[in-house]
Image (cartoon, rainbow, N blue to C red):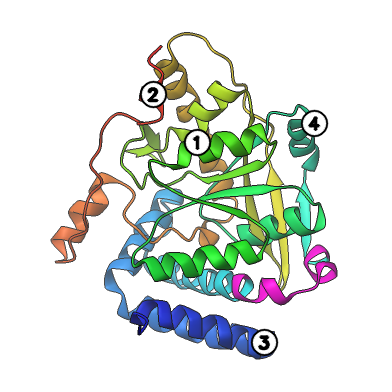
Amino acid sequence: MALDPVTAAYRAGAAFSRSVPRPLAELTAKGLSRVAASVSKERRMLVARHLHRVDPTLEGKALDRAVDATFSSYARYWVDSFRLPQMSLEAVDFGFDLDNFAYISDGLAAGKGVIAVLPHLGGWEWAGFWMTQVMKVPVTVVVESVEPPALFEFFAKLRRELGMNIVPLGPGAVPEILHALKANHIVCLLADRDIVGDGIEVEFFGEITTIPAGPATLALRTGAALIPCAVYFEGRNGHLAVVEPPMEVVREGRLRDDVRRLTIELAGRLEGLIRRAPQQWHLQQPNWPSDYVELERIGKPHPRPEYGPSSLAARGGN
């Protein structure tokens, strides 16, 4: 059966990135990113809107340069990801620094697992590979179930090659996540975008939207450490993981109220992590209600999530 064009393109990109010297892979990816930034009107507009939310002083040519830099950063993300499986552990370790790993090791020592909450920023898969292969720590990653299935399987296979346990986002995810936490895994949740549309309403970069309720709900239910973190590109080939202090996860009242309180705090933590390097924030999808309105205005309507009460938060009542 012939592959769909998108899956075929990703496979070709992976093969090319692994078969040529890194400088050539980077140069080619950067060139393609410039093409994508120029021809994809809606993605360029969305990246500009997101960057302007993070830094309202960005206007005109400065904003255009920041958008170009974001597309270039995204190209670097894919080059890194495609090349990681064939890299030596020594090279991966050499290219990686981590601030405050003690927060993660302390969480694992408690034996209830760690929930690492990240934004779509920098090269987080490098950190996952480092954790699983260098530190020998089990990592479970919850990922979006993209279409077509062949494309999802391509992404899942890539991350399995990096040693990660992959859980597709959906109704069956919760039991697998609970099992992983019980087995004392690090569970990675990308939580700056509410893909399903059942999250908690928060003010995020000055505008009301929703972000996932899952991280807070899982932490309250399991006692796992809830730790915001991010992985940044540093220099030409380096990566820096920043681990923040664990959030204080305590029950103060009804579960849904505690989930809301923690999720609002989490939104603020994610804002701080993104502000450290906004041009490495690879969010190219609508993330606020006004984004959907603007897409409709330019003739590029995008399906909206069906917003409703959090499926995770609603499972346990009080």
- Marks 4/2: CA–CA distance: 28 Å
In this figure, which residue is indicated by the disc labeled 4?
109
**Disc number for residue 175:** 1
- Marks 2/1: CA–CA distance: 12 Å
In this figure, which residue is indicated by the disc labeled 3?
23
Image quarter (top left, top right, bottom left or bottom right) of the C terminus: top left
Image quarter (top left, top right, bottom left or bottom right) of the N terminus: bottom left
- Marks 3/1: CA–CA distance: 43 Å
- Marks 4/1: CA–CA distance: 22 Å
Residue at the far top in the pictured view:
253
Q: Is residue 309 above or below residue 57?
A: above
The answer to whether residue 187 is left or right of residue 173 is right
In this figure, which residue is indicated by the disc labeled 2?
315
- Which residue is pictured at 39% across the width and 45% down the height? 170
Q: Secondary structure at mark 2?
A: helix
Q: Nearer the viewer, residue 25 or 107?
A: 107
Residue type at tag 4: Ala
Residue type at tag 3: Pro
Residue type at tag 1: Pro
Q: Dot 2, crowdedness within 10 Å: few (<14), some or many (≥20)? A: few
In this rendering, which labeled residue sits more in front, label 4 or label 2? 2
Q: Residue 90 at x, y = what percent?
A: 85, 68
Magenta segment: 81-93
